[in-house]
Image: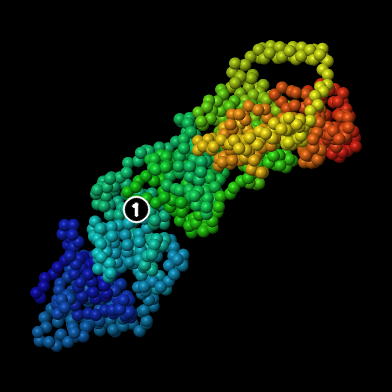
Amino acid sequence: MVNQLQSATVKLVLSGDSLVLRGAQRGNSPPPERTLGLAFIQAPHLGNAKKQVADEAFSLESREFLRRRIAGKPVKFVVRYKTPSGREYGSVYAGPDLIGDDLSLKIVKEGRAKVTDQARNKLNRSDVDPDDADLIDRLLDAEHQARENKCGMWSPKNPHSRPRLTTFDDDATQFLEKYKNRELRATVEQVRDASTLRVMLHLPEAHQMVTLMLSGVKAPMVRTNVPGMPDLVEPFGEEAKFNVEIRLLQQDVKVRLEGLPQGNAAPGTFAGTVIHSAGNISEWLVSNGFAKIADWSAIYLEGGAAHLRQLERAAKAKRMRIWKGFVGQVSQAPSKTFEATVVRIVNGDTIVVHDEAKDADREFQLASIRQPRVSDTDQAGYMEQARESLRRLCIGKPVTVTIDYHKPAHENFRARDCATIKYKNTDLGVHLVKNGLASVLKYRADDTDRSSNYDELLVAEAQAQTAKVGIHSGKPKAATKASDASENATRARSFITHWQRSGRVPCIVEHVSGGARLRLYIPKENVKLLFVLGGIRCPRAPRKDGSEGEPLGAEALEYTMRHAMQRNVEVEFEGVDKVGGFIGSVWLNKETNLAEALLERGLASVHGYSADQSPHGNALYAAERTAKLDKRGMWADYSAEEEARKAEEKAKLEQQRLVDAKAQQLQPRIEFVDVMVSELASPMSLFVQMAQPSKITELENMMADLAVSQMPKTADFVPKIGQLVSACYTVGDEWHRAKVLKALPANQYLVSYIDFGNSETLDVNRIRPLASKFATAEPHAQEAQLAFLRLPNDEFVSDYVDETYDLLRSLVEGRKLVANIEARPANAPIQITLYDPSLGRPVVEKSVNGDIASAGFAVANKHALSSQHNAQAAAKMQELVDDARNAHRGMWIYGDVVGDE
């Protein structure tokens, strides 16, 4: 025999009689390979799907017999002969010492192959090599023994019980659902690159060939000899592939199918994990710099990708292989963890927390997620849902903040810190993503600025996509638009009666502009409103425009922000102010009255008149006394003795005033004027215009002049609160003098027409500066109250407010009346008695005031200044009220409902 015995390692067993041998490695290049057929024997042939050739009977069993014994192991071999085409045939020796009988003898004896006809014919030739002749004789004896024993291919039983499927014709999704996360027996048949394998799954019904992409990792690509595609071998691709081949190729492993790849992958491609007794190949690749983390498939890893990322960071630090030239991003915000309290939810991915250690508020964007786009009308509603979900979960709650990275300013976006924020064991970002209320940002592999909990975010997003929730549901969700109950006083009055009857109304505090001023939202009715705490006065807080506030104004604002902002509260409605704001009480946690809490801390003082009207007036006074005794807030310099001295002086002054008043013997005022009622503000409050011809002419001339004397609109014109302007009334598009009461969102303003008393909300385009010649004239509409009367305080009789309006409107609307100005209180509306001149001599019983009292819609106001001036008229009004009560008219229909007031 000419050829000498050589050493090699079996790379691949192609069939029961053919192998691929690998020589010794030289340097960093892949070792040489050669294909060797086993001399003088023939095993059943495996089929070829491309050539549409089926497997021969017993072909897989024959191949497996040989594979299990020598795949990946060292052997000795000798080449016995070559075919004209250059293919080599020889003998292979395996075993502990790589010596012994030719491996072919074992194969034939077990019935896994037979002796070829060429070998039989060779024995009859004169030039046969003695060694070859001896081997052929022994092979023939082994075959005879296998036939006698009916071994392997000579068995009468059908050995081809399970087919070998090299193509994948099943539904991949259903296949995955059936076998997902089960450990399946498999054989690695091919290594395409270090992270992409062809494996044969040994299933009960078939041997199924699939492509497996290792979950969580991506190795350099190796693509050669692929028809229609150029060769592509990325750096370290061949070395990585070689290392996987020597560890896994044709080895028995277990495979766990975990997911489907992204994009248009070939049929039968899955993401999964290879389980081998020698260790985890994915971890080995990453730790040795042969692969990087693949975020898209890291979500499938059992237990997450944290360990792989740790191995990747170590490989990067060592600049191993694919990381040789790596220059990582340097985060501008080193990771830091601290405890904080959530004080405000800005939007669906941004939160303001109070840093306990620094005693400061800090704003953070949740790391690596993006809220639904507000600009997308189909997703804007999901942004609101995301913000509400965060509010419900963590507002006012203690959280743990881990700063992950700093996002520098870019274009129109300001710089901000990004963090992972956890409430108890709940990651807020994961909570949003899992419910389909946020998406996960995707990064380049070398971008390290990402959430410290990034893998869990990816898993949560996959779960949301599978469940088709939120933004993944395919269902559009537009933003909700709440109606504004505080648009103007008239609109506010249409709500107040209903809410007063409802008792405590559940609300959400959307904004806090001052210690006692809040913007509320009523979810049940989809209504927003401006609300002012009744019975107290809070110092004015500093404004964003730089104007300074009053002492303790900032502290009062801070307290209300900390305890009420974005909280669920309960509200008691007590009244409406002139501009449409609601007045009442706010309850925190159903127990704490916010006004009382501010008073107890000396951050507010009692407003006497308002507190006296409030059902909680006694509690408000008690809270203020507590703050005074404890010398808290504005009462830090409080002295009980000084207050007693001032009270004594005040009592003396009041006593002297009463003495002086008695001495002057106040007489009824007689000041009759012709008037027209231009606006009804409330059942007891109205606006009147003097109906003298000269006044009417003056008003008409001014309006005519105003219509042609409009100042041009300039781009920099911004109406200020309290400013006199020229406003175009919606009905009739006529210009009138007006006063700006309130600035609203979207360039809207609440204005009051000073010559008529009514108010409405206008766009800024319908407002112009008022020429100076129109600003000096007194308003033609004067606010007035019906003398001698008031509405009762009891909530029950508020049901009759609308009826009172209807009666008053029928008595005054469109009529020229006579008014006697009974009193002119300082800094308050005049108090008048209205008469219809067509009814003859003016007497109280026939006045508009008397009609309201007789109808049972008011009570006598004995404390009014008009009652003090005209005791006789006040007494007559009391008689009319008593008569209505006794006759059960109006609000007295069920008896005395107001008690002793």
Q: Is residue 402 left or right of residue 393?
A: left
Residue 59's x, y, as percent?
A: 31, 77
Please tell me which residue is depicted at 44% across the width and 69% down the height of the picture: 171
For badge 1, the amino acid type reads Ile
Q: Quadrant of residue 813?
A: top right
- Can you identify the residue that label 1 sits on? 293
Helix, strand or loop under label 1: strand
Left or right of 796, for residue 31: left
Is residue 555 positioned above or below 405 on the image? Answer: above
- The percent coordinates of residue 215 (x first, y second) are 37, 58
Viewer-proximal residue among 179 and 552 = 552
Q: Position of residue 828 (x, y in %)?
A: 71, 26
Instruction: Tell me if residue 658 comes above or below residue 492 in the rendering.
Output: above
Q: Position of residue 857 (x, y in %)?
A: 82, 36
Q: Residue at x 42, y 42 (%)?
A: 413
Regarding residue 549, the answer to whether it shows in the image is yes
Task: Please name the residue shown 80% across and 33% down the image.
Answer: 817
Q: Quadrant of the N terminus?
A: bottom left
Residue 311 in sight:
no
